[in-house]
Amino acid sequence: MQKPLPKNLTSRIKLMNKMHKKISLICIRVLALVAAACFFFGCHPGSKETPSQLNSLKQLTPRHYPLFIDTLDFKGLTASIDHSLSYFKKVPLQRKYQYGKQIYTAAHMIRSLETFKAFLEKEPSTAALNEFIQTFFIVYAAAGNQDGEVLFTGYFEPTYEGSLTRNDDAVYPLYGRPDDLVEIDLSAFSDQFKGQKRLVARVDDSTKRVVPYFSRGQINTLEDFHTRSEPVVWLKSRVDRFFLEIQGSGRIDLGNGDLLRVHYAGSNGNAYRSVGRYLIEKNEILKENMSMQAIRTWLEFHPQRMDEVLHHNESFVFFKTEAGGPYGSLGVEVTAFRSIATDSRIFPKGALCFMQSQLPDTIRINPIKEWEKASFFVMNQDTGGAIRGPSRADLFCGNNNYAGFTAGHMNQYGKLFFLVLKPDPE
């Protein structure tokens, strides 16, 4: 049963009714959804559990800085820095980025990255690098979990088989963004909702009311969904389609030597729910054996339960074709082992970071126990529906076999730091 709206919210709605009848019809339904069913979208206005930009990063004193060693020999770092610079140079120079209690402008972020990049060109020693950072940079530690650690997972750009047209082999549509999908920014109606993510919804044809967008299960059972969303390509495997959604981008092998790149174009707004956790809870896969590869194997051996398991995750991703990439949430290309995805609500976009975790050996990638300690600089250039809070980060691993293995098995705790140039003395 739907809860009654608060009196102050009712009066606000009445005022909007007088101002604009068409907008109010949509707004009433939206605000009712927020008051009574906001959990569906995963937003909690005013909740104490909402992560804060103020406490997500802790400024360190120089004597508490980590030892900065790039075990990947800085490979690809300069290119990744250039991608963040491209982003910062497209936004207003006075746009603000928050590091704990401190605020820095886009202009300062540009100066920070250009300073760091120029120093890298000198091919500094480990000692020189650490002295440089201690002298010129402020370092912040991600709050992480109760132990101050961040859980690092991985994602990659897979390649799957498909066709531009439906045929006997390729029968699973990769849908484009639906025509009837709308995004609603509640902050436009009330300051109460500033900082909350946009609601994804549709207008019900019969009631003309705004309702949550179709879930995964509904999309898969609607026979006419193709009239709302035109497929951009057809895949040979339903499991491939599901994992392509998890990765957010990929390459489709069209069978004639051509590769089609597909990228994230939006989602249905439903909350992401882990099918891996579901299979663990159902005692289908042991926690210590869980990986993307284990999930794929289980699904392929249990096709009769595919609806049950896949529909557990009500989130559904839509795609578009685009040259280049893959692209992160900043609209710039992500770089293998140099780009991470974090919670964009609490961590500064485009920032220079340093992570301490573990990676598999590049030659002997099996078994997983062979993973070794690694530390390297990364750029915060992406986000994701499952990446929430100060204790999560997702590492982009590239598009080869090593990338697929690393992304599929990565579930490592470590430390994450954010670096920014010290402000000039006033």
Image: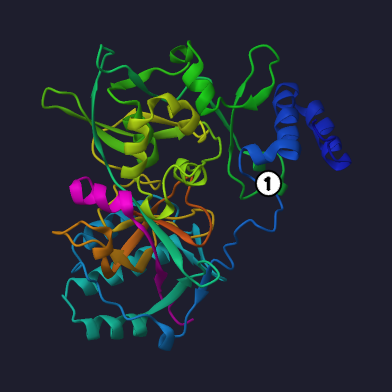
The picture quadrant where one finds residue 52 is bottom right
Vertical comparison of 350 with 260: above or below = below
- On the image, numbered disc 1 is attached to which residue? 193
**On the picture, is 399 further left or further right than 13?**
left
Q: Quadrant of the N terminus?
A: top right
Kind of residue at badge 1: Phe
Residue 248 visible in the snapshot: no
Q: Residue 71 appears at what percent x and percent y?
A: 22, 71
User: Which residue is at a point 54% across and 54% down the rendered structure image?
Assistant: 345
The picture quadrant where one finds residue 243 is top left
Q: Residue 424 appears at what percent x and percent y?
A: 43, 79
- Of 377 and 234, nearer the camera is 234
User: Which residue is at a point 35% across and 48% down the rendered structure image?
Assistant: 291
Q: Secondary structure at mark 1?
A: helix
- Which region of the structure is painted magenta? 397-426
Q: Residue 328 appears at what percent x and percent y?
A: 36, 46
User: Which residue is at a point 59% across and 59% down the rendered structure image?
Assistant: 51
